[in-house]
Image (spheres, helix red, strand yellow):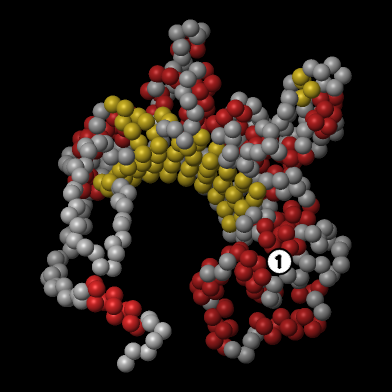
Amino acid sequence: MGHASDDALSRSSGSVSSRSTKSSRKPLFGEIESVTSLSSGSVASVCNIILSGSSAFTRFWLSDNCRDSLLSCFDKSDSANFRLVCHDFGVRAAATLFEDVNVTFKSSTFTKPARIAALERVGHHVRTFAFNLPHSAQTFLPPLVDPSTGEERVLTYVPQVPGTEPVKTKEPKFGSWELADLVIKQYPPLFHAATNVPSFVRAFSAMPFLKHVKVSCPGQDVSERDRRSVVDYALVSLRIAIERAHLLALHSLTLSPIHPAGLFYLKPMLNYGTTPGSGRRWAQIQRLSIQLDSFKVDGKASRDHLKVVHTYLRCFSPSLTHCSFRWNGRRGLDPFTLDTEACIQPEATEHPLARSRRIAPLRFPKLQNMELENAAMDAVQISSFLTRHRRTIADVMFENVHLRSGTWDDALAPLTQISGNDEWKKKQEEVMDVPIMYSPVDPEPIKVNCLPVPSQQPQRARMSFGRLFMGGKGVTLPPKPKEQPKQQPKQQPKAGAEHMRKLLKTSVFSWR
């Protein structure tokens, strides 16, 4: 299951289906049989390998630092084969092999009993779980058509969330039994696997020490942006599973990439299957990274997408310490200051009650690091954001950011006002791509004319402020290193003579 376990699972899942199979089966995930189920000869071989005659190897293997350093150098496939050597190797190498699990969602990913049983055996080692579900022809959902009348039917989806009390009467998952029968006949198995919420909950419950969840949904076509697909239903099940499982160690979330509607289905407020305690799990997230597919800002649909982005970030604002946002494709608006954009404000033709509900600005009381890439914004938006978070923020990076109005001096002016000096400018980094051209062995002197650099705004800048905002007392710069005496460069031989010497040394003839 995943790049850390797909190979091990594919070699073993075909020969194992239940505990009642023969003892000669090949275990899932390269699991080793327990010592009690092995023969006396197998036990002896295991003991001979672990308790080898080499005391140096025994000390090396029983040292946690040495063993972890060795296992970190192994490839995933080598680690899977390494676990098959003996029982002790299998137990101690499992933590490294299954620390990162990468899953590409299929119809049997969470529904096959053998896979879930294997995940329950090694799930306590998983720390990072990557969920991949790319948009494709298999994820596209055509309209439901009534075969008797030829009319399109509207799909009403009610997630079947497992509860603590047993349900006596089973309700249809799609509104009515007639509609459920149409869904079974017309929709692919991948859709039914994506709406199987109990299987998602069981899978995530098997990973109690999970720290980082990665979600990747690439490849959505622009023409399908306003239609639901299998990916959207899978994201609903994924969100419910994270909320229902006891993931007390979860602190990081990465959405890379994600389509605009994906944020809506991952939103823990007023959504499918949400409860009053749904936000409790998401309040643990301290690191959030989003790569969102960009869209053209025109019309009501794009305004709704921007409101979803603003609402989604608001759900995590109280606990975030690190936040990274990147637009894929064309430049997008600044997601942290959408309250200042005119395109997202209520229109004059709307109801007076709707016009009175203006969008409140985002506030991150614990934010320390912020990264923004491929965006277009005003200098006043940057300055207001820095002023609003002056007491906590320590590192800011803008990459491929275009200023629609103002200059970078205007945007970063609050830094001087807060600190009382310009020391922060010494920590600013500007990064650019410099081409490198390799010269021939015997170069001829060529006169190179330096072209004037056009005065334009930097596209990438990183500011590390450190303790700049702590009370407005500025920063304490480290002492400058002492200057070392300059050494005279050694005289190098001429390029032509050195090239001829190398040619003679590598020749097939013997030169004497």
Name the residue rendered at 51%, 35% in the picture: 293
* Residue 324 image point, x, y percent: 43, 42
Amino acid carrying mark 1 in the image: Gly
Looking at the image, residue 439 sits to the left or right of residue 9; the answer is: left
* Residue 275 image point, x, y percent: 64, 32
Q: Is residue 393 visible?
A: no
Are there few (<14), some (14-19), or many (20+) residues within 10 Å of tag 1? many
For residue 124, above or below residue 90: above
Callout 1 secondary element: helix
Q: Quadrant of residue 83?
A: bottom right
Q: Is residue 283 visible?
A: yes
For residue 125, above or below residue 358: below
Query: Which image quadrant: the N terminus?
Result: bottom right
Name the residue rendered at 57%, 53% in the picture: 128
For residue 109, above or below residue 118: above
User: Which residue is under mark 1?
Assistant: 30
Name the residue rendered at 57%, 84% in the picture: 57
Looking at the image, residue 107 sits to the left or right of residue 505; the answer is: right
* Residue 421 image point, x, y percent: 17, 41
Query: Which image quadrant: the C terminus?
Result: bottom left
